[in-house]
Amino acid sequence: MRLLATDSLIPGVELGKSIQNENGQILLGEGIQLSERMIQRLKDLNIPFVYIKDPRTDHIKPGKSISDALRREAVQTIENTFVDIQRKDVFSSSFVIEKASKRFNELIRNIMNEIRGDQDLLTMMADVFTYDNYIFTHSFNVTLYSLAIGMEMQLNQKQVEMLGLGAILHDVGKMLVPAEILMKPDRLTEEEFEEMKKHSEAGFELIRGVKTVPVLVAHCAYQHHERLDGSGYPRGLGGEDIHTFGKIIAVADVFDAVTSNRVYRKAMLPHEGLEILYAGAGTQFDTKIVEAFRRAVAIYPNGLGVVLSDGRQGVVSRQNVGASDRPVIEILEENGLPIIDTYEVDLKTYLHLMITGSDSSDSKVSH
């Protein structure tokens, strides 16, 4: 299977992995030949990448992630809770969070069990779902990444569970942001952004009034936009004044934001998102946390077309746990020409080779 950018699809290619909505209903099934209208529909749904069938690489399977059922349950629980908060006053919202916290903790433990039970690297590219509201899926994705980081850093069970709850609720304050700003389809004005920035403090105030939730969870909402160099908000904290959980969620939050499709910006591939994190490592983000993220998450997802430093081209076929930047590559082209007998190169073994580029826009797929 090949992983291609939706913008580069051409009519006639076959879908390699079904696309579902938030209720698990299949919108486009595996094996269907995509028409121009279907491709436009995928673009309208803000789906950045899809898996396409390719006879040369059909043996390559998408990496594993969280089960479809658990993902749907988690996102639906987040949505129900957040919408309920949006409809109530601040005082009543505390009871909504208190009631939901038990269910959130159960979901977090279930997610942790699935991550532990899968020895492969975590990948979100294998999940092709459509959702009506970015905030709910973002909250889930940030939770997933945060848990993966926390477990990679070998935090204890209680710490990881608390981190997960902080990640689920990190954006709950957005429910108090005016709807016309929250749901605006394009870039915010400077004044609107200042209003949006208030969600960190609003989330802190909402959560800290909940008796059954540790105050540290409230600080996750308060601190996830703080930066090591003091350039963040709302308080301009820096260095050790930012809790480790705040630093972890900051990394997860930024990565998911840049690798998600928005109306005003196309989604980056995972390795491009990692470059953003490394560019800020030591100044905005904790380097140890960025490194833990790199070890836990598939940076070059299975099916992604890549170019090696010696000019050979291929597709990522398998992951090396603990070395997400050194996957196994199936070579498809040498000296610019396709080869009949493809073969694998394990970058963990051939350390002199590097991935110098990726090509998710190559729509020259046999069909």
Image: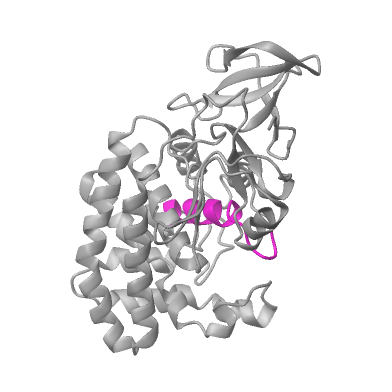
Residue 341 belongs to the span the image colors magenta: no
Q: Position of residue 226 (x, y in %)?
A: 50, 62
Residue closest to the eye, 108 or 287:
108
Residue closest to the eye, 306 or 29:
29
- Residue 156 against residue 162 in the figure, above or below: above
Q: Quadrant of the C terminus?
A: top right
Q: Main secondary structure of the magenta part?
A: helix
Q: Position of residue 154 (x, y in %)?
A: 30, 38
Residue closest to the eye, 280 or 337:
337
What residue lies at 40% left-to-right and 43% top-to-bottom? 149
Question: Which quadrant of the figure has residue 183?
Answer: bottom right
Instruction: Answer whether residue 257 is visible to the viewer in this image.
Output: yes
> Residue extending furthest top?
341
> Residue extending furthest right?
336
Position of 205 compared to 187: left or right? left
Q: Position of residue 328 (x, y in %)?
A: 54, 20
Position of 83 compared to 359: left or right? left
What residue lies at 54% left-to-right and 75% top-to-bottom? 197
Q: Position of residue 317 (x, y in %)?
A: 54, 24
What residue lies at 62% left-to-right and 51% top-to-bottom? 48
Q: Quadrant of the N terminus?
A: top right
Region of the chain picked out in magenta, as a range:
246-265
Question: Which quadrant of the figure has residue 56?
Answer: top right
